[in-house]
């Protein structure tokens, strides 16, 4: 079945509707120009831009004593301002912003290497927000190329450094210079290896699976369909039963399962699609699914990352107050 046939079928059988808010949002994401902002520049208002800042300790507005981390991947935060607010998140102070930690990049790759995954972690740690990051990175894959080097790239740099050292330049000095020139591309792999023994091969192999269709579903009853590779830029909203998921997904699809306020277990019977379930540590919601899925744990942000997030929230709240 082609995607156009699927769209027609969804509209006829399930009375699927075009969701105007998500359609406008995803179209703005698709067409926006990606701009790197250095940290002395302010955020620009208006549509048409995906703006990115890599923020570090020196970007804190107030001088505070932040504990020094042993892990460089705790020492920065990628802040992305989207061209439009995420429609379902308008009640939070900064619905136009995504905070992407190195842990998120690593989890994106790890989840992309498994057919069925469970992403869990402490309550309130933004597991659900990982789904919006996943959607963004699938639509704008150049963000991955810009920010997430593979381990092989670091190996290649080391080999080149050895050759330069033979020419009298010195391996250590060459690597230091490269780090200064491309700091934004230097990310230590497996950022969450301090919390679990992750399989490093997941980051060394080929790029992760990228779906043609993303179905973000709430308890398997209300779903938003994102057609990553066409034929439509519209986002469809569908009401259905959990068992219906198999009817409009296939092996080229990814289901993002969000439990919402319900208690339904993750539905996976007869489903060929990839599944990423973002759930609390309550195993009652995924007891059976866990027998066949790979579980990943989302670690807590560092204190510095939390302070940088809070800084963005405060400035966004102040801006809303002045505009109201």
Image (cartoon, grey):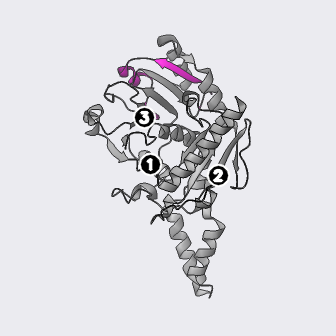
Is any part of residue 82 visible from this angle?
A: no
Residue 38 appears at what percent x and percent y?
A: 70, 55
**Dot 3 surroundings within 10 Å: few (below 14), some, or many (20 or more)?**
few
In this view, the residue in front, 238 or 192, is 192
Q: Residue 8 sits in which quadrant?
A: top right
Is residue 276 rendered to the left or right of residue 56?
Answer: left
Q: Nearer the viewer, mark 1 or mark 3?
A: 1
Instruction: Please check the rendered image and state whether residue 35 is part of the magenta-colored stretch, yes or no.
Output: no
Residue 191 appears at what percent x and percent y?
A: 45, 57
Quadrant where the image shows the C terminus = top right
Mark 1 to mark 3: distance in Å? Answer: 20 Å
Q: Of helix, strand and loop, which one carries label 2? A: strand
Q: Residue 233 sits in which quadrant?
A: top right
Which mark identifies residue 251?
Answer: 3
Residue 12 appears at what percent x and percent y?
A: 51, 11
Residue at mark 1 = 107
In this view, 17 is above or below 130: above
**Dot 1 surroundings within 10 Å: few (below 14), some, or many (20 or more)?**
many
Mark 3 to mark 2: distance in Å? Answer: 35 Å
The residues colored magenta run 230-256
Mark before the other along the chain sequence, 2 or 1:
2
Residue at mark 2 = 53
Residue at x 74%, y 43% (from the top left corner): 44
Is any part of residue 87 visible from this angle?
A: yes
* Furthest residue in direction bottom, as rendered: 168
In this view, the residue in front, 86 or 161, is 86
Which mark identifies residue 323?
Answer: none
């Amino acid at each position: 079945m082609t995607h156009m046939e699927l769209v027609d079928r969804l509209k006829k059988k399930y009375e699927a509707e075009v969701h105007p808010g998500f359609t406008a949002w995803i179209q703005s994401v698709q067409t926006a120009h990606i701009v790197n902002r250095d940290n002395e520049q302010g955020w620009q208002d208006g549509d048409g831009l995906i703006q990115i800042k890599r923020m570090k300790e020196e970007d804190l507005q107030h001088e505070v004593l932040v504990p020094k981390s042993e892990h460089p991947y705790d020492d920065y935060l990628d802040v992305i301002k989207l061209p439009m607010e995420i429609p379902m998140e308008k009640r939070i102070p900064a619905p136009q912003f995504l905070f992407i930690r190195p842990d998120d990049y690593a989890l994106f790759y790890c989840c992309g290497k498994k057919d069925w995954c469970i992403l869990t972690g402490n309550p309130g740690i933004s597991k659900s927000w990982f789904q919006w990051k996943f959607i963004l990175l699938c639509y704008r894959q150049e963000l991955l190329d810009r920010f997430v080097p593979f381990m092989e790239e670091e190996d290649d740099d080391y080999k080149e450094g050895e050759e330069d050292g033979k020419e009298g330049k010195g391996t250590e000095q060459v690597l230091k210079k490269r780090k200064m020139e491309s700091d934004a591309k230097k990310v230590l792999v497996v950022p969450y290896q301090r919390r679990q023994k992750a399989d490093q091969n997941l980051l060394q192999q080929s790029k992760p699976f990228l779906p043609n269709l993303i179905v973000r579903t709430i308890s398997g009853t209300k779903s938003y369909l994102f057609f990553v590779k066409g034929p439509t830029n519209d986002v469809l909203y569908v009401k259905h039963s959990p068992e219906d998921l198999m009817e409009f997904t296939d092996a080229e699809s990814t289901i993002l399962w969000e439990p919402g306020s319900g208690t339904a277990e993750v539905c996976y019977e007869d489903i060929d699609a990839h599944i990423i379930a973002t759930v609390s540590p309550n195993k009652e919601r995924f007891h059976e699914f866990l027998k066949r899925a790979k579980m990943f744990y989302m670690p807590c942000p560092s204190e510095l990352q939390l302070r940088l997030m809070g800084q963005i929230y405060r400035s966004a709240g102040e801006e809303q107050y002045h505009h109201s």
